[in-house]
Amino acid sequence: MEIRKRYFLSKKDVKKIKKELEVFFENVDEIIPKKGNVEIAITDDFEIILVDKEPIAFKKDDKVIPTLKLLLKSLPDKNLVVVDIGAIKFLINGADVMAPGIVDADENIKEEDVVFVVDENHKKPICVGIALMNGKEMKEADKGKAIKNLHYVGDKIWNFKG
């Protein structure tokens, strides 16, 4: 992934990002410390937000979306979707999440929400996506796409070196 542009963010922009991340995390000041160097790396596909050269989030369609590396450190307790073991091999190759593979989902999820997909055994994040149906429908549906996969283990964002 080629970086086209990279620059440090102003305090005002950092504040905006913190506000967007507060939707998912209570410990935003730990994620983006006051003395942290916050940068944006612009690539052809994404704007990646870095804190001390670590990718913590990316922007897609004006939404700030946490990276899996951040989720491994601090997993929110909302917007979680649990998938069965059989779905993992497809998800880590970039496939969208299909409803039959979903074991459980936060019923407060609404269509277009950012969601975090975890495996049923270890509850480790596998991918981040956008909900294509609400949480209740995800649990009940037996066919169709439930989540658009935006970022998964092993993709360009996962492998990004700051």
Image (spheres, grey):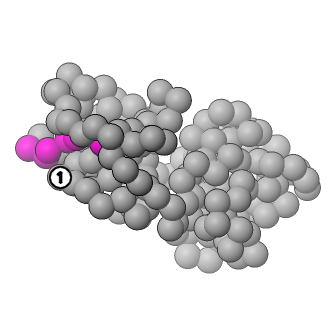
Q: Is residue 156 left or right of residue 37?
A: right
Q: How many marks?
A: 1
Residue drawn at the location 64% of the way across and 51% of the way down:
149
Residue 150 x, y percent position in the rendering: 58, 48
- The answer to whether 108 is drawn above or below residue 159 in the figure is above
Classed neighbour count for the residue bearing mark 1: other residues with Cα under 10 Å, few (<14), some (14–19), many (≥20): some
- The answer to whether 112 is drawn above or below residue 52 in the figure is above
Residue drawn at the location 55% of the way across and 60% of the way down:
152
- Name which quarter of the figure residue 73 lies in: bottom left
Q: Is residue 146 left or right of residue 69?
A: right
Residue annotated with mark 1: 52
Q: Which residues are drawn in magenta?
A: 35-41
Residue 156 x, y percent position in the rendering: 46, 58
Residue drawn at the location 45% of the way across and 41% of the way down:
44
Residue placed most toward the observer, 79 or 101: 101
Q: Is residue 34 left or right of residue 24?
A: left
Observer able to see residue 27:
no
Residue 142 x, y percent position in the rendering: 91, 55
Q: Quadrant of the C terminus?
A: bottom left
- Name which quarter of the figure residue 94 lies in: bottom right
Residue 61 highlighted magenta (yes or no): no
Observer able to see residue 78:
yes
Residue placed most toward the observer, 27 or 17: 17
Which residue is the extreme one toward the right?
Answer: 142
SS state under label 1: loop
Q: Is residue 70 left or right of residue 119?
A: left
Residue drawn at the location 27% of the way across and 47% of the way down:
50
Indicate the amino acid at tag 1: Asp
